[in-house]
């Protein structure tokens, strides 16, 4: 399967935008809010348990609750669960935060969906995607860190397998660090850090979390992260550029250093031939600037305009910035202009690399 590259033609210099999404991933706060359910069959049990775990006050309208649902009412994981022994009515939906239907008959499902929408309540009818305003998806829970996975109803089993892969990568001990992040956030905000300093704090926090995942976060951990952020703030007055190799290669082969460089940049400059999935690693808020490709060893005026004090720029282009001659020449020019320069290899060689290129020579000797 071929990878998408920069658009050609009259709009070739337009910045890369976010690709289309089948659904909008959002996270609802349901604590002490009313959730209405219709139906008491077995498929309703997990949804009721999930809503209760989120702190919702769950009201279930059903004349025939299954035994598992009755057991759940006795010991809910969070918010209370009440059963009203009758069928639902349209006025039951008024004021609810969400409405869930465990309904088999299509006519009844249609009536429930229409009543919920009339009341302005987001609705989900279990196992009937056409009757849903939202989907639950598959969940990885390390609360307060929660990860949701959706296949837009196309392949739930696929989503479950992806969940299993993520579960294996995220130790249970990260729950404590996620709780610490929530507790420490006000203190971090009180320091008045700028974006880069805040990000440096949370990068240091993440490094410590994964290095000591089974350890309880301590005040000393907060102090170490704070000191890292303060060091970043002291160094953030000058412009900085990180040169990132961007091809050729598959986005899955992008180095972690390259991804981090893109995610910490205020501005991302990239050649018009850089594959869109590579640019997509950058954070959404970063300014994207397209320059004509191929680029030579001199600095384009567009690049120079972005080198403002305190701004961090990531420059994506083909080749290895640590080895290719044109990259080395750019780094020398940037350093001569009192710009802090970093490099990361990213994806490697240029498509048109020649045998006299230092990068080609180095790799050919391996």
Image (cartoon, grey):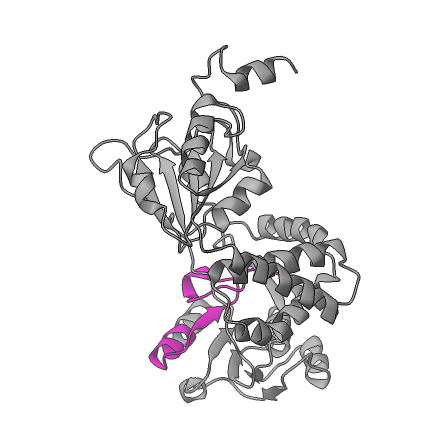
- Where residue 85 sits in the image (x, y, percent)? 58, 89
Q: In which quarter of the image is residue 279?
A: top left
> Which residue corresponds to the image point at 39% horizontal and 40% vertical from the top-left?
337
Please say if 6 is above or below 91: above
Residue 237 position (above or below residue 319): below
Q: What stretch is highlighted in magenta?
A: 112-139
- Which sits in the foreground, 40 or 144? 144
Identify which residue, 111 or 153, lies in the foreground: 153
Residue 254 x %, y %:
55, 36
Drawn side of residue 270 relative to residue 169, left or right: left
Q: Nearer the viewer, residue 97 or 215?
A: 215
Query: Where 54 falls versus 239 (above or below)?
Result: below
Q: Would residue 285 appear left or right of 209 to someone viewing this image?
A: left
Left or right of 326? Residue 212 is right
Quadrant assignment, res 12: top left
Residue 166 picture location, percent across and down? 65, 52
Residue at the location (71% across, 65% down)?
221
**Total of numbered circles in the picture?**
0
| Magenta stretch encompasses residue 169 | no
Q: In this view, does 140 lie above or below 273?
A: below
Image quarter in which the C terminus is found: top right
Which x, y percent locates residue 323? 53, 24
Q: Which residue lies furthest to the left in this view?
A: 10
Please indicate, yes or no, whether residue 16 appears anywhere in the rendered image.
no
Residue at horizontal 50%, vertical 71%?
Answer: 192
Residue 38 seen in the figure: yes
């Amino acid at each position: 399967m071929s990878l998408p590259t920069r658009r050609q033609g009259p709009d070739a210099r337009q910045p890369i935008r976010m690709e289309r999404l089948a659904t909008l991933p959002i996270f609802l706060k349901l604590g002490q809010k009313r959730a209405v359910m219709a139906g008491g069959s077995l498929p309703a049990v997990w949804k009721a348990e999930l809503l209760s775990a989120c702190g919702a006050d769950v009201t279930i309208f059903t004349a025939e609750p299954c035994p598992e649902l009755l057991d759940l009412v006795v010991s809910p994981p969070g918010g209370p669960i009440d059963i009203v022994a009758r069928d639902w009515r349209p006025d039951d939906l008024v004021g609810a935060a969400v409405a869930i239907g465990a309904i088999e008959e299509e006519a009844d499902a249609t009536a429930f969906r229409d009543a919920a929408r009339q009341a302005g309540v987001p609705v989900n009818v279990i196992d009937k995607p056409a009757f849903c305003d939202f989907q639950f998806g598959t969940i990885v829970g390390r609360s307060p860190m929660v990860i949701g996975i959706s296949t837009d109803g196309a392949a739930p089993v696929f989503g479950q397998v992806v969940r299993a892969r993520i579960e294996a990568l995220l130790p249970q001990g990260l729950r404590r660090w996620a709780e610490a992040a929530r507790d420490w956030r006000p203190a971090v905000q009180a320091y008045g850090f700028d974006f880069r300093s805040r990000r440096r704090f949370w990068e240091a926090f993440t490094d410590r979390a994964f290095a000591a995942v089974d350890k309880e976060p301590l005040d000393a951990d907060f102090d170490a992260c704070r000191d890292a952020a303060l060091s970043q703030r002291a160094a953030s007055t000058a412009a900085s550029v990180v040169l990132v190799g961007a091809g050729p290669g598959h986005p899955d082969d992008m180095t972690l250093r390259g991804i981090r460089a893109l995610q910490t940049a205020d501005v991302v400059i990239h050649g018009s031939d850089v594959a869109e999935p590579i640019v997509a690693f950058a954070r959404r808020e970063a300014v994207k600037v397209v320059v004509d490709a191929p680029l030579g060893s001199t600095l384009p005026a567009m690049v120079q305009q972005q080198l403002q004090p305190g701004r961090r720029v990531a420059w994506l282009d083909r080749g290895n910035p640590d080895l290719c001659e044109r990259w080395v020449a750019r780094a020398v020019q940037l350093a001569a202009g009192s710009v802090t320069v970093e490099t990361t290899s990213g994806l490697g060689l240029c498509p048109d690399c020649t045998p006299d290129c230092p990068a080609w020579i180095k790799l050919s000797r391996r």
